[in-house]
Image (cartoon, rainbow, N blue to C red):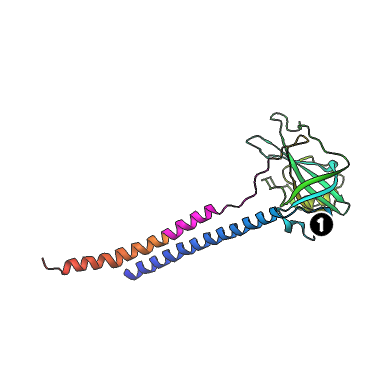
Amino acid sequence: MRAFILLVSIAGAALTFRLGIWQWSRAEQKWALDESVKLAQSLPPLNSAQLLVLDNVQASIHQRVEIEGRWLSQWTVLLDNRPQDSHAGFWVITPFEVSPQAVYLVQRGWIPRDPVQRERIAPFDTPMGWVKLSARISEGPSKMFELPMPFPAKAQVVDQKAPFTFIRQNIDRIAFAKETGLNFKGNLIELGDNSEGLVRDWPVVSVSAARNVGYAFQWFCLSLLIVFLYIWYQILKPLRHAKQSSTPS
């Protein structure tokens, strides 16, 4: 029985200690990621020429850009179910053409959704002609849950004659490139003050490891508790009891 208790105690202490190490490693990863985000944000913004020569735009995620081009407003998409300050609304996504061979999918801002009629879109402007854009490189819009297509094998085939869907749940850059024929190079998020009827109150990009540190501390404490309980009940307490029994009354 004592051998069994010893094995269980060793296994429990080792497992909880290993879980603590795992959570601590996750925290270290987040610290490193947070440092990389801060470094990218501190770099000077890329201009159009510097952005065009990047082989992998997404590798420079979070870095700012100051570029010139034109909006392709005919391909504007509204992403539904994107709340802002507890209000339902859309993210406005519009391609931005720097050159015919380089188009970027830009998350321009947020507009409220009509609570009664979903298709009644709040007005917003898209500047015409050649404009300047201040933005940062992003991973692209987050994906929301959506029901799968009834025929997934056929859904991958782009129907060029199908009407363009203005309001969508999600947008995939590669699939959208096939649909529009545009040569997308990456995703951007437009920066700056609210304008053109769009709200640009984007959340601050930061990575917190506080939760992982807390979990690691809990696992380490549990591991120490198992060791302490084993030593107390299996070593110290029996020795104390034996000492008291051997003492003449």
Residue 23 locus on image (x, y percent): 52, 59
Name the residue at the left extreme: 249
Residue at (83, 45) in percent of width and height: 132
Asked whether 151 or 110 is in front, the reply is 110
Along the viewing direction, whichever of 65 and 209 lies nearer the viewer = 65
Q: Which residues are the magenta region?
A: 201-221
Q: State which quadrant residue 108 falls in.
A: top right
Q: Is residue 211 magenta?
A: yes
* Residue under the image location 69 percent in, 54 percent down: 42
Tell me where residue 103 appears, x and y as whole percent: 83, 51
Residue 158 visible to the viewer: no
- The residue that label 1 is drawn on is 50
**Quadrant where the C terminus lies?**
bottom left
Question: Residue 175 at what x, y percent from top left?
Answer: 79, 51
Sort mark 1 into few (<14), some (14-19) or many (20+) by Cα contacts within 10 Å.
few
On the image, which quarter does residue 125 sit in? top right
Residue 163 placement, left or right of 218: right
The amino acid marked with disc number 1 is Gln
- Left or right of 211, for residue 113: right
